[in-house]
Amino acid sequence: MSRKKPRGVALTALIAVPVAAAALVLSACTPPLPPDVLAAQAEANITCQTGSVDVSAPEIFKGAMDAVGQSLTATCPVEKVTEVSADVPAPVKLVDVLPSPALLADFKTTSCPTGSTLVVPAFNYPVTLAFNEPGLEGIQLTPQAIAGILNGTVKTWDDPIITASNEGLALDGLPALKLIGLNREQGDVQAMTAWLSTTAPDAWKLGTVGSVPVAKAFNSVDALITEITANEGEVAVLPVTTANNNVLGMASLPAGPNLDIWITADDVQLAKVGSAAMTDQTSTLAGGQSTDMLIYGPGLGGVPVEGQFDIAASKIVLSDGQELIGWPVMGVAHLLVCNDKANPLPLSFAQYLVRLAGQGSLEAFGVTPLPEPIRIKTFAPLQVTTAANTGSTE
């Protein structure tokens, strides 16, 4: 695998050109502007709207849309954003699960009966197996080990399939493993089981699913967190930000084409690299509505897809000789937006969220911003313009 490093900036000499000659050159041939220039133009300004818009969010990412809304209101004081729970109909809906045809149909019926539905990725989030077991932070779990925990065949920490990748770590005498989850589809479970389907198909045979049959199910994230933090030995598939916020241990996972590079879950830079491994599933999930929707499946394996990662734009620095391999299990949250000419507020919020300022507020919240090449692609479905405005985002 090639090793990529931050790009330098090449400086060229300026050559004076007579005004008339320059005009002749420009009139004869005006090449199209490169994508990064177009993106900068689109983000230079924002048209502030007046009024309030509700944005629903899943419990697992409670507060994320408030973070974006506060950033937007700081720029546009007359534009107010209110985050509501996932079960409240709203013209903008954040989802952590894959936007299935059934989910899109429900959004159309409940939240967008007179407009068209736009869908774009909102952010990425690293997923891991979190646990309450002091002293095991960073334990190395292979896909086969995680598959065994999720299907119920691995019940103790000292199972040979776990000890094999953790030589020298004392794992005997610990409480038995107890898997817990939610009583509904989870985007983090979808991402983890998609990874297992790819890396350990012999051990994981259920395919990509949003819930695991052997897990004890809870009605809310709060109830799940209360349970796992109170009981040693309990484990759950969770976003890294949720595990971090609740001081839970997290497994290290293998990444790369040969699964031979162990990565810890708390490396923010490598989460950005891993996010670029997500794949475009628009045609599969959107029913051919590619002009209005951009849907991505989870990033798996940690190796960026060609053309989906800009190391300079991501502002990360790799050590000398470090390969461009990131966190191997990245979920993707999406925005469902009701595009109704009678109400410009939902589209305005979505446009702001995918701007650099919006993505920055999400990164401060604790999730992973979109890779720059994919972020730029979101401009087309959201119909971002460069119209005159009343506020600046940059």
Image (tube, rainbow, N blue to C red):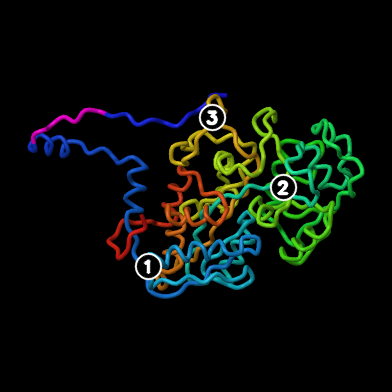
Lateral position of residue 372 relative to residue 278, left or right? left
- Number of labels in the image equals 3
Marks 2, 1: nearer the viewer: 1
Identified by mark 2, the residue type is Thr
Local secondary structure at mark 2: loop
Q: Residue at x 83, y 31 (%)?
A: 168
User: Within 10 angstroms of label 3, few (less than 14), some, or many (20 or more) residues?
Assistant: few
User: Within 10 angstroms of label 2, few (less than 14), some, or many (20 or more) residues?
Assistant: some
Query: Separation of disc 3 and disc 1 at Cα?
Result: 40 Å
| Residue 76: assigned label | 1
Identified by mark 3, the residue type is Ser
Residue topped by disc 3: 319
User: Within 10 angstroms of label 1, few (less than 14), some, or many (20 or more) residues?
Assistant: many
In reply to whether residue 172 is colored magenta, the answer given is no
| Residue 254: assigned label | none
Lateral position of residue 211 relative to residue 279, left or right? right
x, y percent for residue 209: 73, 51
Identified by mark 1, the residue type is Cys
x, y percent for residue 383: 39, 57
- In the rendered view, tell whether residue 163 sits above or below residue 352: above
Q: Which of the two residues, 139 or 179, is positioned nearer the viewer here?
A: 139
Marks 3, 1: nearer the viewer: 3
> Are the residues tagged 2 and 1 within 8 Å (C-beta)?
no
Write down the quadrant of residue 267 in the picture. top right
Residue topped by disc 2: 208
Q: Give the magenta part as a residue range.
A: 12-18
